[in-house]
Image: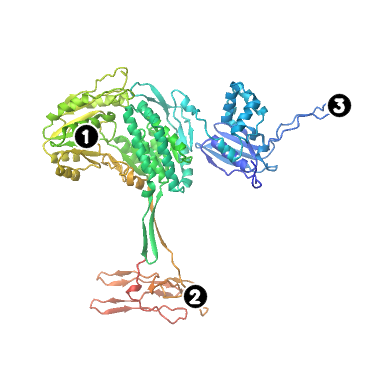
Amino acid sequence: MEFDETPQMLPPPPGSFIDREELIEHVGEFAVSQGYVVTIKQSKKERVVVLGCDRGGVYRDRRKPIDDATGEPLRKRKSGSRLTNCPFELVGKKEDGLWVLTVKNGSHNHEPMKDISEHPSARRFNEKEVMLIKEMTDAGLKPRQILKRLRQTNPELLSTPKHVYNVKAKLRQGNLTAVRRLKTLKSPTAAEGNSEPSSSSEPSWKKRYPPRFPNLIGGRFIDSQSSTSIDVLNPATQQVVAQVPLSTGEELKAAVFAAKRAFASWRNTPVTTRQRIMFKLQELIRRDIDKLASSITSEQGKTLKDAFNDVSRGIELVEHACGMANLHAGDFFSNISNGVDTYSIREPLGICAGICSFNFPAMIPLLMFPIAITCGNTFILKPSEKAPGACVHLAELAMEAGLPNGVLNVIHGTNDIIEAICDDDEIKAVSYVGSDAPGMYVHARASANSKRVQTNVGAKSHVVVMPDANMDAVINALVCAGFGSAVQKCTAISTAIFVADSKSWEGKLVEHAMALKVDAGTEPGVDLGPVISKQVKERISRVVQTFVDNGARLVLDGRKIVVPKYELGNFVGPTILTDITEDMECYKEEILGPILLCMQVGSLDEAIGIVNRNKHGNGASIFTSSCAAARKFQTEIESGQVGVNVAVAAPLPLFSFTGSKASFTGDINYYGKAGLQFYTQIKTVTQQWKDFPSSGASSGLLAYDAPSNSGDAHAFQSIDFTSNDVSLGLHLREFSNGDGVPLPLHDDLPSHDGMSLPLVASKDFPSSDGESLEQSRDLPNSDGISSIPQLDGSHWTLHF
């Protein structure tokens, strides 16, 4: 790689980096651009690294000189094989979780390289080439044959057969650490052509069993420094399918630092570019939908069909983000005042964070970060520790789609990380989806630190069944919405209120519920999978028993169900309780299990009253053939989302998810137009562009120390703004006194000699008896004679 200009050999600018490798990579790339090559002089991997200058790798002449007298080789003291006595030195130290680069000595004692290919490092193989060398060596190819094949894909390869021999020797010794250090210094064209990762290679964390999910910080998947992990269990088998690290506070700081550094350039990236990345992301999600669904089923337990629906709903959210530019447009008002335009624009907040629940491992992250980053923010995502696999896979796809480093970061953890997110001053907004108590805590703590917060909690919805409803439609809807996904979703129907007699419905409802197949999510024909954990199963059993103890009638009991081949699974079968009353404590709370509570009332008004008195307001539906009843329900019900003859009232992403009352805390809801409003802030701009002629009607905007025609430096010059004989100057507003008489506002401007010069506009003001009260004062012009002319009403304009 030849340089277009003479390199200046400048030292890299000091800065902070996420890890040691990023620091070394940054310094190495900068050094090559300046005509020198750095080398590691000293390293304590976890604390400090000292970098020096490799002076082009000039080797000494190994041929020993011959003594003319004796003809024998002269014996002389050996010198270093490379000239490494350049005083240039950089130091990288780890401080507060980040690696800080400082320049100890930025000078060199040699000339820059004119061509980087002169340096021996240019003859190194990259990691992919080394692996190809290994494969071809195992196949019996000779070094020259190997080199010939490598040059077919990389014509600019400078290595020789000797270098191939050296690599083969290291591979025979099992020294694969050298492979990671071999980075070819080629021209950008060659580097681009050889930078595609091998499709057969997998990240090292995926090769472990069970895999330990890494954090994504600054575009790099990095294993957490924490030695503590949480096992992710398959709810159907209790087998450990993965591990989640409890990340440290330093790692969150590193993620915040990476997001802050990326925000400066990402916010200025055109919205069309951000949209194209979203288009690519939804394409990649469709490509990997099978992998995502499989990961969700193995970690969360829901059936493969429900897992596919989870991902499909997430794709709809990404598609919505693809059209964000239409919603991003601001407002414009031309000529709001004389020659003045006003417009508003939406700007990103900065760093935003999302805290995810386990019940929708794909959809919940996708209702957060695609909209946030398309609006120009950077994002820190904390997956659920119970089902993190889909989050990590989506982050991989986002990077593959072309998302710049640091725009999306993923940090694993539990309460400590959540509290650190709420407390970090750099994070401007927090989104949370989960249970009641944690959601209220997140809202209180983040709000106390002046963050925008939205928390979607309280998964409890009602359905009202009128006597004129279609029985088959109602039964199918209740079974699907009341037991689907093991009712581990915020839109599930947990309570059915039957207006008039419900006895006729019970038999058919129980019959349909018993027909549901309960099994592992991967089994064919399964309708209902396990709940997320044994603790949840035990809590559901306690809740059912509490209802029974308080007088409820247990029509169908699914607590004791046993699934063949999966006896250890967290299975709870469909459970139906009737004779539920409003005063039962368990009725007032969310359950998150396959339990359907049935109540009976005498009228629609009574049913509406029960729904409205419940503290949750996520959604409510009515089944009826009466338009009047549906209209009354829609108007009087106090729920954020209303369904008519549909069980689940969750809207498509074109509309916002509008939970209310205790089901939502915050000011602005999720996705749709509300999502855009949450992740952006409004800036209003007022501007005036106008030609200002040198003469015309005089205004009241004066300039000090402008020389007059008579040479008086202390006279006031008037600046004229004219437009069709209408004054555009700075005039005084009118204020009225207590009697309704307008009073002129006037101030006195001090002159240079200490005298006060009044600034008063002349206008007639009517008195209480209808006569005109004329108030006028003269202001000298450049000749000291003329006064401000009498103004009529057309000269008075409103200025802000």
How many numbered callouts?
3
Residue type at the position of mark 2: His
Residue 551 visible in the snapshot: no
Residue 198 vertical position relative to residue 340 in the rendered view, above or below: above
Query: Does residue 420 appear left or right of residue 668 in this picture?
Result: right
The spot of residue 182 in percent (x, y) is 60, 31
The spot of residue 139 in percent (x, y) is 59, 21
Q: Would you name the residue on which mark 1 appears?
A: 588
Mark positioned earlier in the residue sequence (2 or 1): 1
Of 453 and 183, nearer the camera is 183
Q: How is the image coloured?
A: rainbow
Q: Would you name the residue on which mark 2 appears?
A: 714
Query: Does residue 663 appear left or right of residue 60 in this picture?
Result: left
Q: Residue at x 21, y 43 (%)?
A: 638
Of 402 and 43, nearer the camera is 402
Residue type at the position of mark 3: Gly
Q: Would you name the residue on which mark 3 appears?
A: 71
